[in-house]
Amino acid sequence: MQSENKMFDDFVKMVNGFAGTMAGMGREAESSAREKFREWVGGQDFVGRDEFEAVKAMAAAARDENEILKARIAALEAKTAGPTAGSTVIDLNLPSRQAVDESHARLCAAGYANSVEPWDTFFGARYAIICDQDGHRVGLKSPQDPSRSYPLQ
């Protein structure tokens, strides 16, 4: 048997209304917090995954190209570091063939780089080339001896 107590019914309605109001406030607070978080994240200028992968691929390609260019630079520096074919040679005329051999041996022993070992040229002179510390080529040449000349082949 139910009793009709007006005060009890009003209290239940009030609590029920209060619960509905609190649930609505919770949903409103959650919605507002989500919106604020979206605004904050949007203002942080984050990149998407596809943009990140594109930049990552570009960086890898740049690293590979950098390694290739480093190798090319090293090869070019190696070519130009020392004497090169066709570069200028300053000749020193020495008094004899023996002086060429002795001077070459003495200069190499003193630390100068050997570029061309002493040899007999087709025009009859003894000739050698050394390089100084700056890479300049210096030729050591004896006088020509026609009896030692030979035709080019």
Image (cartoon, helix red, strand yellow):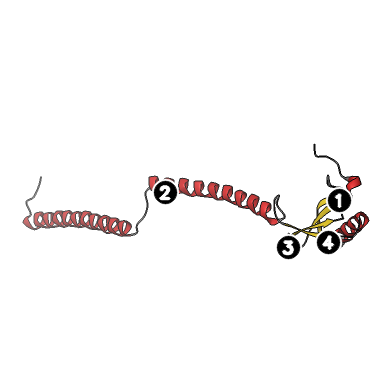
* Circle nearer the viewer, 2 or 1: 1
> Residue 125 has which mark?
1
Q: Nearer the viewer, mark 4 or mark 1?
A: 1
Residue type at numbered disc 2 = Phe
Q: Residue type at mark 3? A: Asp
> In the rendering, at what x and y percent does residue 22 appear?
20, 57
Q: Are marks 4 and 1 in contact (CB under 8 Å)?
A: no
Counting other residues with Cα less than 10 Å from the Cα at mark 3, is it few (<14), some (14-19), or many (20 or more)? Answer: few
Please, what secondary structure does the residue beneath circle 1 have?
loop
Image check: 126 left or right of 71? right
Q: In the rendered structure, which amino acid carries the disc numbered 4?
A: Gly
Distance in Å between CA atoms under marks 4 and 1: 25 Å
From the viewer's perspective, tell me whether residue 16 is left or right of residue 99.
Answer: left
Which numbered disc covers residue 96?
A: none
Q: Quadrant of residue 41?
A: bottom left
Q: Is residue 25 left or right of residue 2?
A: right
Dot 4 or dot 1: first in sequence order is: 4
Residue toward you, 122 or 3: 122
The residue positioned 50% from the left and 49% from the top of the image is 62
